[in-house]
């Protein structure tokens, strides 16, 4: 009876734990699909093309933009990031739920184009905790970390456009909250069709 899948958009400052929360949700819910974004960012050690991202040159990315292949895209910290449209739309049509882990600019584009998308913003317990996590993660230089922290305050101005906010101080709790949101959102009337009740 449920027709199409749920589109879940998860954003939050870098280091807020979005990635960990998403992985936790995916581990427990094997039938949810996570979209693999295209980016012009260079791969970090251990990242694989087609697994973490589809790594593109700027020229390739701009071609995807021009050909309307992207559901949304944004320039984030000097690199382009975007969601390939076709896979997401086809998966939703098959009735499968899809997660996009994307920045605020992209999330708001998705909301404008697909009003039923469910936007979740993950926040870290504090800026100090965030700085600590980013340093521990060791994937960014100190200069990049300070740049990212400066953006956080600006990003927080947009949280009121999100449907839900999850404070991530306990990962397991944050994962449970995402699952609870999925459960509740799937009870929305537009996911149901009662034609066969005639
Ligand atoms: P990172 O370089 O650390 O993997 O990601 C940097 C930022 O880009 C994160 O906030 C991440 O959520 C965002 N991002 C990743 N993929 C996409 C995408 O497809 N579209 C948009 N708009 N942002 C993305």
Image: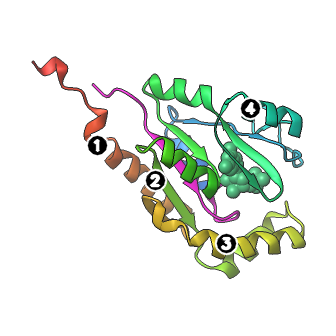
Which numbered marker is on residue 178? 2
Residue 57 visible in the picture? no
Q: Reading the chain from its start, which is encountered first: label 4 or label 3?
A: 4
Residue ID at (74%, 76%): 150
* Mark 3, other Cα within 10 Å: few <14 / some 14–19 / many ≥20: some
Does 197 appear above or below 88? above
Please report the bounds of the magenta region as a residue range. Answer: 1-19
Does 4 appear above or below 39? above
Please tell me whether mark 4 or mark 3 is closer to you in this view. 4
Mark 3: secondary structure: helix
Which quadrant is home to the N terminus? Answer: top left
| 3D distance between C-alphas at marks 3 and 2 | 22 Å
Where residue 75 sits: x, y (%)? 76, 52
The residue that disc 1 covers is 188
Which numbered marker is on residue 152? 3
Where residue 125 sits: x, y (%)? 58, 76
Q: Reading the chain from its start, which is encountered first: label 3 or label 2?
A: 3
| 3D distance between C-alphas at marks 1 and 2 | 16 Å
Q: Which of 12 and 132 is in front in this view?
A: 12
- Tag 4–tag 3 contact (CB < 8 Å): no
The residue that disc 4 covers is 66
């Amino acid at each position: 009876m449920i027709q199409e899948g749920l589109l879940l958009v998860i954003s939050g400052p870098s280091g807020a734990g979005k990635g960990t929360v998403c992985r936790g949700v995916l581990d427990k819910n094997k039938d949810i699909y996570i979209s693999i974004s295209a980016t012009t960012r260079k791969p970090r050690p251990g990242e694989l093309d087609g697994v973490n991202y589809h790594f593109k040159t700027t020229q390739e990315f701009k071609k995807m933009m021009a050909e309307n292949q992207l559901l949304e895209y944004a320039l984030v910290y000097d690199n382009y990031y975007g969601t390939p449209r076709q896979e997401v739309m086809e998966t939703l049509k098959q009735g499968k739920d899809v997660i996009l882990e994307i920045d605020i600019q992209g999330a708001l584009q998705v909301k404008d184009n697909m009003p039923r998308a469910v936007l979740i913003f993950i926040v870290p317990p504090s800026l100090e905790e965030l700085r600590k996590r980013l340093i521990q993660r060791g994937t960014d230089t100190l200069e990049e970390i300070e740049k990212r922290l400066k953006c956080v305050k600006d990003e927080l101005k947009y949280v009121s456009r999100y449907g839900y906010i999850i404070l991530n101080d306990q990962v397991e709790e944050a994962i449970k909250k995402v699952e609870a949101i999925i459960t509740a959102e799937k009870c929305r009337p537009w996911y149901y069709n009662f034609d066969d009740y005639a």
